[in-house]
Image (cartoon, helix red, strand yellow):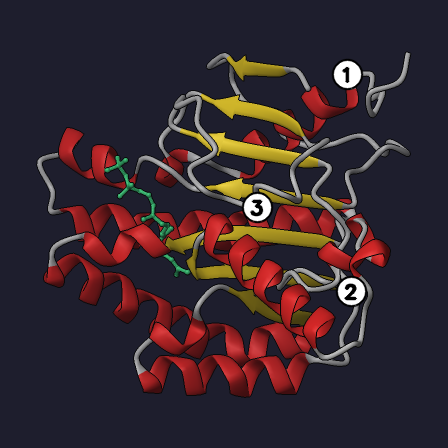
Amino acid sequence: MKSATLNENPPTESMPKHPDIPRHIAIIMDGNGRWAKERGLPRREGHRAGAESIREVMEACKELGVEYLTLYAFSSENWNRPEDEVQALMNLLDRFLDEQAKELDKQKVRLQAIGQLDRLPQKTRERLEKIMARTAGHRSMTLVLALSYGAREEIVAAAKALAEDALAGKISPAAIDGDAFASRLQTAGIPDPDLLVRTSGELRVSNFLLWQISYAEIVIVKKFWPDFRQGDLFDSVKEYQSRHRRFGAL
Ligand code: FPP
């Protein structure tokens, strides 16, 4: 697994057709707070601007023919932020869901969510569930929102589910393999990410999809998330296309 930091050349305006489009792109959207701080704005303004970048990136992924886009929108650790920031993030999520309810349906995009959704405010969860049900049959792209998500928690839950199934005689311990484990993760049925993008230049995976990113190509972009535009996504995909993926073989 190689990683590279994209420099700050002007981003690509458009993307030539290329056969090697990542099937699944996962993004750690980092740097909203620093973006706001640089402008003397409250942190919530950084998050608000970050929601705009989400819209751009969804468009770009659809244009490229990416099948799955997973966004780390709220981590299980984010609950430890000050109450007003958590509230601002939940309000933005509500607004995003309200705006996207019709749009996702129109664009034939399926919405899915991973994470401890029962920790979300009831109204937010209801909005989410409604759109997920409404878009369940769509396949032009799948947008996966990671909300109240932590990979370690997900892995522990899968281990518990396996232990319970073993106790109930549904699976023998000898039959437990990678597929059996992956089928108990919340991402069951979703292919592993081919490309993991992280903004703001930080070199961390921050408890995101730890099992699923085993062979993902990692691209680090030195821009805060609210500055991330369509061209930056195209550049990240170009970087991915320049890699030689070996999956551990020669
Ligand atoms: C990291 O910035 C970003 C998040 C906490 C999650 C991303 C949230 C959004 C893009 C807001 C809108 C979300 C939806 C789904 C509408 P940070 O606060 O950690 O930045 P910092 O590291 O500079 O402090």
Pair 1/3: label in front? 3
Q: In which image quadrant can residue 26 be found?
A: top right
Distance (Cα) linking label 1 and label 3: 23 Å
In the image, taking residue 193 as reference, residue 34 lies left or right, namely left
Q: Earlier in the sequence, mark 1 or mark 3?
A: 3
Q: Which residue position holds label 3? A: 209
Q: Earlier in the sequence, mark 3 or mark 2?
A: 2
Distance (Cα) linking label 1 and label 2: 26 Å
Q: Position of residue 199 (x, y in %)?
A: 44, 31
* Amino acid type at mark 3: Leu
Q: Position of residue 79 (x, y in %)?
A: 25, 58
Residue drawn 77% across the image and 63% down it: 189
Q: Which residue position holds label 2? A: 140
Location of residue 31 with respect to 76 vertically, above or below:
above
CA neighbours of label 1 inside 10 A, class few (<14), some (14 to 19), many (20+): few
Residue drawn 61% across the image and 69% down it: 112
CA neighbours of label 3 inside 10 A, class few (<14), some (14 to 19), many (20+): many
Depth check: 8 or 29 in front? 29
Location of residue 145 with respect to 214 vertically, above or below:
below
Count up the numbered dots: 3
Q: Name the mark on residue 158.
A: none
Look at the numbered discs 1 and 2 and tell me whether their residues touch, using CB distance below 8 Å: no
Q: Earlier in the sequence, mark 1 or mark 2?
A: 2
* Amino acid type at mark 2: Ser
The secondary structure type at the circle numbered 2 is: loop
Location of residue 245 with respect to 19 vertically, above or below:
above
Residue drawn 91% across the image and 34% down it: 19
Q: In which image quadrant can residue 188 be found?
A: bottom right
Q: Is residue 232 visible?
A: yes
